[in-house]
Image (cartoon, coloured by chain):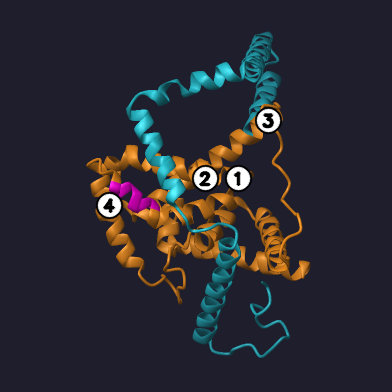
Chain colours: A cyan, B orange
Amino acid sequence: MSQGYRKGRGSGPVPKDDALEEVSEDALGDAFDRDLAHVFADETDEDVAELSRSVLSRIAREESGQGRDAHLAEVLSEPLPWALGFAGLMALGVALGYLASSGGTGDSIFAYLAFGDLLGLLGGF
Amino acid sequence: MSDRAGTVGEPPGHNQRQTEAKALMAALANGERAALARLIALFGPGIRRYAAQALTVPTEAEDVAQEVFLRAWSRAAGYDPDKGAVSSWLYRIAVNLCIDHNRRGGFRRFVGIDSLPEPEDESPGAEAGLAARQRLTQVRRAIKTLPERQRQAILLKAAGELSGTEIAAALGTSEGAVEQLLVRARARLRALMEKED
């Protein structure tokens, strides 16, 4: 895909005229984007019938009230992961509470630093 | 999207598509489901293509595409044509959903709720198909190394086939900034692909 897009690196004469160079850069960019689009287009088909059907079915389900229990159904079908997630959040709350309480002893700066590290860690996900 | 074969700038039929899309949004706000089906026909393939490249788990692209149109349906009344094209509005939803999915997926995989994405199917098939898959894997790997904004811009351009103006509106930035992002992304991709070739 990179072939044919090199510009002025010993593979040929570099255009002297700025305007020409700008046009050439635009054309190169467009050709590159088209080629990239072609690579992506190979993977997926253009048929949207299934997508359309799914969206319209979900709208119909939600309007008839059947979609409201979907979250409850997910929790009931996979209780362990959700319980673990909840326990994790509880543990996080305990840890944060512990760190915050140490702020009252005079070492508040370290508590804030640790709190910042923790938030940074969470933000990474 | 039959109007893929664009020349320089916007693809042919672009303005016509935008005009139709605006009319469809008005119909959508009135609860016309046929308008939603038409909107999906216009933008569905591009959004699915974009999501497949932007997501850590490409198989979730169909779910994201569904979610984009469900949100379009429920928020159609809030669409303001003066603030940008329909395509920008839809792709903005898609960009945000992909970011959310990747973030949530990373956390779910970290705590073990979800498993790691399945590796690419490298089973032998027709030679041309295999070569295309390898090419796609190569391109996808190169795109993953780009900074997030560059990656979003180049994917909106190549997979979503948006113009510079539409990308700028979708990413909430200026056209000049988008052009810069695209130039840098292309240069880096070219360099990476040349190295791999």
Residue displayed at 55% across by 65% down: A37
Quadrant of residue B10 within the rendered picture: bottom left
Give the answer, above or below, for where B159 lies relative to B54: below
The one nearer the camera, B169 or B133, is B133
Cα separation, mark 4 vs mark 3, equals 44 Å
Q: Main secondary structure of the magenta part?
A: helix
Cα separation, mark 4 vs mark 1, equals 28 Å
Check disc 2 and report the residue beneath it: B62
Residue B24: give its label.
4
Quadrant of residue A68 within the rendered picture: top left
N-term mark: 4 or 1: 4
Give the answer, above or below, for where B121 lies relative to B17: above
Disc 4, SS: helix
Of badges 2 and 3, the one in the foreground is: 2
Residue displayed at 68% across by 30% down: A121
Q: Position of residue B98 (x, y in %)?
A: 54, 43
Q: Position of residue B16 (x, y in %)?
A: 30, 66
* Magenta stretch bounds: B34-40
Q: Amino acid at mark 3?
A: Leu
Check disc 3 and report the residue beneath it: A121
User: Is the same chain shared between marks 2 and 3?
Assistant: no
Would you call the spot at circle 1 few (<14 residues within 10 Å), some (14-19), or many (20 or more)?
A: some
Quadrant housing the C terminus of chain B: bottom right
User: Is the same chain shared between marks 1 and 2?
Assistant: yes
Chain letter behind tag 2: B
Check disc 1 and report the residue beneath it: B59
Disc 2, SS: helix
Quadrant housing the N terminus of chain B: bottom left
Q: Amino acid at mark 4?
A: Leu
